[in-house]
């Protein structure tokens, strides 16, 4: 047998092996997928939990609301000073900011509205790391009309997350709570 014929047979054998392997993987995928998804969900949940201050982390459960309908996973936590904190993790920044912009639109806020939250006024803007002036995300605050509660939503760009908190006090107090929440988060001791 010539080298060309042998090489051709070897190549055909490799192609047959690859084809058979792909067929097996394709056939096995429906059986493997249910085991892969919970692992991805646990990883996403651990990312969200690592974002929360230590004292809040222990109160978190899986969020069953439809507030973060396009999120990979979302959690709901009890945090001192507010009624509730919910956080959703998105696949990418495009889906995160599509959801955030829709939230801002529904709240009748203008994008890049200014520093009203600090003064107790409805507004929307970006926020930055104080020491480095690095952009961290965006936040908005407003009074939710049907419930008459103060509401704040914010994004965390580095993990593609959106969160919100609300309570029955005024916007200025909610903003101060949020600032404290970030200090706790950055310095969990």
Image: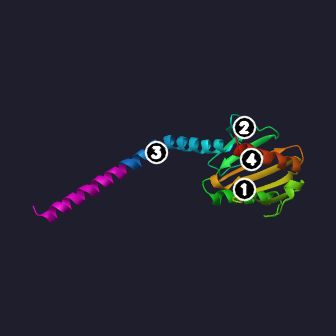
The span picked out in magenta is: 1-23
Q: Secondary structure at mark 4?
A: helix
Choose between 79 and 89: the one closer to the eye.
79
Q: Position of residue 177 (x, y in %)?
A: 82, 45
| Mark linked to residue 30 | 3
Q: Kindly report which numbered mark, 3 or 4, lies closer to the viewer in this rendering.
A: 4
Where is the C terminus found, in terms of image quarters? top right
Query: What residue is shown at x 53% (from left), y 41% (from top)?
Result: 39
**Residue, disc 2:** 56
Q: Give the class, few, some or many, for how many residues have Cα within 10 Å of label 3's Cα (few <14, many ≥20).
A: few
Q: Kindly report which numbered mark, 2 or 3, lies closer to the viewer in this rendering.
A: 2
Query: What residue is shown at x 72% (from left), y 36% (from top)?
Result: 55
Q: CA distance from mark 2 to mark 4?
A: 12 Å
Choose between 25 and 104: the one closer to the eye.
104
**Residue, disc 1:** 131
Would you say residue 160 sits in the magenta stretch?
no
**Residue, disc 4:** 182
Sequence order check, earlier mark of 2 and 1? 2
- Confirm whether residue 146 shows in the render: no
Q: Kindly report which numbered mark, 2 or 1, lies closer to the viewer in this rendering.
A: 1
Sequence order check, earlier mark of 3 and 4? 3
For the stretch drawn in magenta, what is the main secondary structure?
A: helix
Residue 89 in the figure: left or right of residue 174: left
């Amino acid at each position: 047998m010539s080298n060309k014929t042998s090489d051709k047979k070897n190549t055909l054998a490799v192609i047959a092996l690859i084809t058979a392997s792909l067929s097996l993987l394709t056939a096995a995928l429906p059986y493997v997928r249910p085991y892969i998804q919970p692992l991805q969900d646990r990883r996403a949940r651990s990312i969200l939990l690592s974002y929360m201050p230590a004292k809040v982390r222990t109160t978190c459960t899986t969020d069953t609301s439809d507030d973060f309908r396009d999120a990979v996973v979302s959690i709901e936590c009890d945090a001192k000073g507010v009624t509730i904190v919910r956080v959703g993790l998105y696949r990418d920044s495009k889906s995160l900011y599509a959801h955030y912009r829709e939230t801002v639109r529904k709240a009748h806020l203008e994008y890049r509205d200014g520093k009203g939250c600090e003064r107790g006024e409805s507004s929307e803007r970006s926020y930055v790391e104080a020491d480095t002036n690095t952009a961290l995300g965006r936040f908005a605050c407003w009074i939710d009309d049907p419930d008459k509660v103060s509401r704040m939503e914010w994004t965390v760009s580095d993990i593609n997350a959106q969160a919100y908190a609300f309570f029955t006090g005024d916007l200025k107090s909610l903003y101060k709570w949020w600032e404290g929440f970030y200090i706790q988060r950055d310095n969990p001791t």
